[in-house]
Structures are given as C-alpha cells and as structure tokens.
Amino acid sequence: MKVGMLTAGGDCPGLNAVIRAASRKLIAEGHHPVGLIAGYRGLAERNFVDLDRGQIRGILQLGGTIISTSSYNPYREPNGVELVKRAVDEEGFDAIIAIGGEHTMMMTRRLYVEEGIPTIGVPKTIDNDVTGTDFTFGFDTAVQVATDAIDRLHTTAASHNRIMVLEVMGRNSGWIALFSAIAGGADGVLIPELDISVEEMSEALTRRHESGANFSIIVVAEGANLAFASGETRQVLANETTDEYGYPRLGGIGAALAEELEQETGFETRVTVLGHVQRGGTPTAHDRLLATRYGIKAAELAINREYGNMAALRGTEVVSVPLSDVTGVKTVDLNYLQVARAFFG
Ligand code: F6P
C-alpha cells in the first residue's frame, strides 16, 4: 500500500513521534509511507517526500514536524477538493493519515464521506480540546512547560511580595491552565469555560494575604474572559486581525487581569506570557508514548482499510473512533476545578 501522511494546523510536540511510529509499522509490513509536505497543500500540489528508514531516523524526541504544517483547507481553496482527489487517484494513494486538530479532523471526515478519499485521523493539539478522545499528545508537554514556569515564578514572587499572573495557551478550553495550576500549586485560575469576576478573585487573594501568605500565583488561559461583578465581560484580543480559521488573535488577558487585580487588591502584580514556548521543543515521555501508540494505531487502520476513523484514547486504551465523533470543542472537565479550588483563598 502507498500511504500518505500529513501534519496540519499548529504544530505540537509529538508530531514526529507519530510520523516515525506509523512509518515504521507500515515499512515493517511491506508498505510505502509518503510524507505530504505542509498538510493538505502537499497533497494538492503533489509535494512529497519518501518516509524511508533514513528519513525517520532520530526524530522521536524532536519537536515540530519534519514534513512541515499548514492550515491549507481544500474546501476553501479554488479547485482544492478536485486537486486533492486527483492527486490521490493519479498518485495511487491507498490511504491518507492526517494528523491534526479539530478543523483538520472535520475536513478529513468530509473528504472521506463526500469524496470517498480513504482518510484516517490522528488527534493532536497542546490544547487537548479535540472531541472523541480523552487526551491529545502535545498537551502533557505544554502542561509541563507551564508547570515549570509556575515553579520558577514561585521563588521570585515570594522574594518580592507580589502577585504573579501567568498567561498560558488555551483558545477555547482551560485544560492547560487548570492542569498546570493544580500541578504547580497556583492560587487562582481563570479559564474560558467559567467566568470569575475580578472582584471575586481579588477577595480570595486578599484573604490569602491576610492569612499570612505574602505572594500569589494566578494562571489564566488566553481565551478566558475578563469579567466584573457588574456582569460586564470581555475577551482580550492581541489585535484586530483573525487567523486562517477566522478566529480572533488572542493574547493580553494576562496583562489586563494583572492591571485590574493590582488596582483592586493594592498588591504589586506582574505578568508573564508563555506563548509558543509551550508548543516548541522536546515532547515529554508521556507524549512520546501516546504519539507512538497513535502512530501504530493509524498504520493498522490504514493496513486494514478502516477508513473514516481516528485513533483515540479512551481511558488507557488506544482505540478507533469514527471521525464523525469529532464535533466541536472538548471543554475542560470541571471536576478538576474542584480539586484546584481546594487550595485557593
Ligand atoms: O491550538 C493550539 C494553539 O496553541 C492555541 O492555544 C492558540 O490560540 C493557537 O494555537 C495559536 O496559534 P498560532 O500559532 O497560529 O498563533
């Protein structure tokens, strides 16, 4: 079989581990893995690279993606779907493994259902917001980076008697914020799923400082709202532009929240924005393991011609779920907020 493999959307740690695992499994079974450069664009424009043993050697621990990524969407490009279809037929691809987030999974399902293209999905994103799977790879690494940052903020915060606000990624969901807040022992967290007013947070911080603490750490997801007791809420944007999906460019909630908290509590408040540091670099062992298991599963789905499915984690098992199960955003499990709250105030 000739199996195309692509990475689409934002990169995340572990993409290369999937590519390596799926390719190794395919090669071992006598098949031919091919990398499609820069997502579906590589398929439409027929920009390929053989994923032979030499090409995939030494990439397990490497961040980013050796086959590049893009947000090219065939449904949005002139003749995009036709170009993709013709490339699959004329180049003789028996399966296409698409490694991507929610948007990639949705276009991958459409290509299978509407065009009969033999696609298979693998869910990725540091945000862990893809439905149909319990966890995506890349998430654990991002949480570790954020947790390390909280650890570092602790010592400097304590030395200066300050509130430190850490802004982490999470456009639609608070997974990274909540997990790192618990793991790092933060004193407050703000996530897109639940508005907490500046006044309510300030009261908790004041109580904490009155009870003897001389510093506090707040973690805020970039997609969280700035909310006030008056009922006013707003999302903070980096600028007026939108990204390739039409989403507003987020960023700045950390600084906005810090300003409000400083005013409300009277404590000096500083902000740190982690940004793309959370997405780059070496995947954790956990992410390498998950990505490797996903890669093997995706290769098996291709070999068994079980198209229209996605590799997914359910509990501790890597299973196959229909791509149609990927609908909307997977918001954070609010039970984790109860755990985090036990340490606030
Ligand atoms: O989806 C992952 C993510 O890191 C989001 O948390 C963030 O909003 C977005 O990607 C940033 O994307 P870009 O690299 O296009 O700025």
Image (cartoon, rainbow, N blue to C red):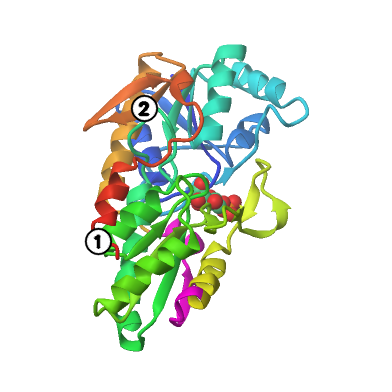
Give the amino acid type for the residue marked by disc 1 in the picture: Phe
Residue 24 visible in the picture: no
Residue at disc 2, secondary structure: strand
Report the front residue among 182 and 259.
259
Q: Position of residue 162 (x, y in %)?
A: 39, 81
Numbered circle sitting on residue 343: 1
Residue 257 visible in the picture: yes
What residue would you read off at disc 2?
A: 311
Residue shown at 72% from the left, 31% from the top:
76
Q: In screen coordinates, is 149 left or right of 6? A: left
Q: Position of residue 211 (x, y in %)?
A: 25, 76
Task: Check the image and report above or below for 100 versus 277.
Answer: above
In which quadrant is the N terminus drawn?
top left
Q: Earlier in the sequence, mark 1 or mark 2?
A: 2
Q: Are marks 1 and 2 in contact (CB under 8 Å)?
A: no
Q: Position of residue 42 (x, y in %)?
A: 61, 36
**Is-magenta flag for residue 278?**
yes
Asked if the beta carbon under badge 2 is closer than 8 A to the nearest atom of ligand 1, the reply is no
Asked which quadrant contains residue 8, the reply is: top right
Task: Check the image and report above or below for 76 versus 91.
Answer: below
Q: Residue furthest left?
A: 316
Q: In screen coordinates, is 219 left or right of 233? A: left
Q: Residues within 10 Å of mark 2 (few under 14, many from 20)?
A: many
Q: Residue furthest front?
A: 230
**Is-magenta flag for residue 2?**
no
Instruction: Write the start and end of the magenta stretch as one range.
Output: 264-281
Viewer-side label of 1, 2: 1
